[in-house]
Amino acid sequence: MWLLETDGSFTRDDDIATGLEIPGEAPPAERPADPVVTIRFGGAMDGRGFSTANRLRAEGYDGRLIAAGPLMPDQARHAFQSGFDAVLVSDAQVQRQGEDAWRNAIHRSVQELYMPEPGSRGPERGIWAARHAD
Amino acid sequence: MYQYDGHDQAFVAARAAEFRDQVARRLAGQLSEDEFKPLRLKNGLYLQLHAYMLRVAIPYGVLSSGQMRTLAHLADNYDRGYGHFTTRQNIQYNWTELKDVPDMLDILAEAGMHAIQTSGNCIRNVTTDAFAGAAGDEEVDPRATCELLRQWSSLHPEFAFLPRKFKIAVIGAAEDRAAMKFHDIGLRAKPDVQRPRYDIWVGGGQGRTPRVAQLFEADVPFERLLPTLDAMMRVYNLHGRRDNKYKARIKILVAEMGLDAYRDEVYADMAERDPAAFAVAGKEYDRIAAFFDRGPVAPIDDVPVAGEGAFAEWLDQNVSAHKVPGHAVVTISLKAKGAIPGDATGEEMRLVADLADDYSAGEIRVTHRQNLVLPFVPQSALATLYGRLVEAGLATGNVGLTSDIISCPGLDYCALATARSIPIAQALSDRLREREAKARAAGVTVKGPTLNISGCINACGHHHAANIGILGLTKAEEESYQITLGGRADGGAAVGEILGPGFTAEEVPDAVEKIIEAWEANRLEGESFTDAYQRLGKAVFKAAVYEEAPRVAA
Ligand code: SF4
């Protein structure tokens, strides 16, 4: 398995701690106590995992959140900006989509947004905040 | 109008660069077509029947003359010399090549434009009243809210892979000129002490299951607008159906869950969140609103303008009252006799840009009825302006008449179409313009029913919301056109009712003419088509079309 971190590092490791695994379909009824939670996306077009992560952050979960499932490199920024700390990528995905595409996923996508979401782990600082800094 | 600053400019340039990389990876085979599809759709690029189609955003329908020249340049250099203005106030280029699209996006970015979220399962281009900032009955200029929403929703990380597309419209006047209640979320802005407050409507839409939106909450103060929309989107993202794309819009979620249960979920989500995260939106709203408050024209003396013949018709139909004395709002009809609704050539776009510079403070609007508007014309310039439109063949005086037809591209371009719509629109236009000319010559006011055509059940041509709607279907491998009556897109929004069995393409003009004749024969003095339809019921029209029955007394 491979892991993409918010700082852009992308490394392969056979032994990745994925903690409690939950489906992306719905936020859990109780806030998990586990230090690591992995949210599994049902499909690349199924954006519920982003809202599930955002909801967990809003509820105050401050452990490590990992996104897993058939995501594309282009969705890495969506994951980080919705509150994930890392994206778990299978060997098969890396094989097909290219290691390079994952390694550069963050640099090649749009870095700045108008308004970061609360809980974001992404690189954006917010255009509105910059405009009204004083 | 709103002007991009360095941040906006960098944002659209970064998006264009990102897309260039995605296209390169697709062309290199690193992205499969299945993977590339959602990425290209989020940037308005469709694979149609004959070529890639690029849909460019015209946010809330506002264009500068310079931007219109950029659109003309794209039409001439990357398409076959024309573009198609859509019911969502965007423009489509039907004949683009994938390898050229990154260059087109760079050219657009230079002009402060983009194709962000003009398609895909995300928040689409926000639409509004084409007369915003100019209409006599306006209470709040909706454009500042639209621009705020454009910025908030652009490349939104969480709401980019929704169950289905999501459309928002904003209005700020008593009259609804944006079909607000046919949107996933509709906002009616009202004046308040400092910033507007809003009535929020939810669950409207067209397509296979047309619905008129319901009131979610009235009089929401500005400070709660974005927090509420944020929670509304999240509940939809988490709970909207993903098992069936025809049941995936928010209208179905609200119908299945019930409005009250949906509302409870939204408020529960909001309760966990600190609205202070959105506090900066207030200052941003003020910054944006300042662009629109500085209206481009000052009051001058009113000049009465009158004319004869075609000029008089044009004055009656295409010229509307302005909120600034001495000015008028001019609609340029893209519905000449026999024309393709919404199509304009590069040459026509450049001419309109010149007219905007000469007579309308350099500003142009695109309407959801697929026409163009010059929003700030001094009354004293109307006659000269009309002369120049006549020369260009753009002086058709039929705005608001039945020949002002809405039509989607249909089977001539669209991969989803079940029938042609353009040739039907053209045949109807020929027939209706003749009727209108006769009526005008006889001194009769002809403000008739609205007529909209869609080439499939997706209803991009808004047929459900038309007084007379036409839907092209395929029945036993033949095109069959279903007619609906009584739909309305205005404040009294309603979905049309199916009249009866479908018609062949050739039969449509006769059927429509019989419907209009039945209305004319049976209406009370001054009665609109929809009022008459409600009073008389379907039977009268059915008889007129299918039986040639004698007319009933009014
Ligand atoms: S209504 Fe159907 S045919 Fe017409 S543009 Fe939309 S999808 Fe295509």
Image (cartoon, rainbow, N blue to C red):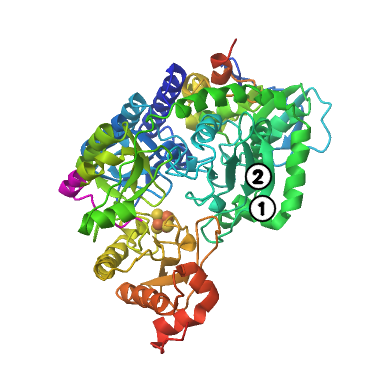
Q: Chain of mark 1?
A: B
Which picture quadrant has residue B235?
A: top right
Q: Residue at x 56, y 41 (%)?
A: A45
In this orientation, which residue lies closer to the viewer: B79 or B137? B137
On screen, residue B44 above or below B313: above
Residue at 75% across, 37% down: B269
Check disc 1 and report the residue beneath it. B253
Q: Earlier in the sequence, mark 1 or mark 2?
A: 2
| Image x and y of residue B42, in percent | 47, 38
In the picture of the structure, the residue carrying the numbered disc 2 is B236
Residue B385 in percent (x, y) is at 23, 42
Q: Identity of the amino acid at label 1? A: Leu
| Left or right of B382 on screen, residue B421 | right
Give the numbered dot on residue A40.
Answer: none
Quarter of the rendering containing residue B512: bottom left
Asked if labels 2 and 1 touch by Cβ distance under 8 angstroms, the answer is yes
Span shown in magenta: B387-399
The residue at the point 56 percent across, 57 percent down is B246
The x and y percentages for residue B464 are: 49, 62
What secondary structure is marked by label 1?
Answer: helix
Furthest-bottom residue in this view: B550
Give me the chain letter of mark 2.
Answer: B
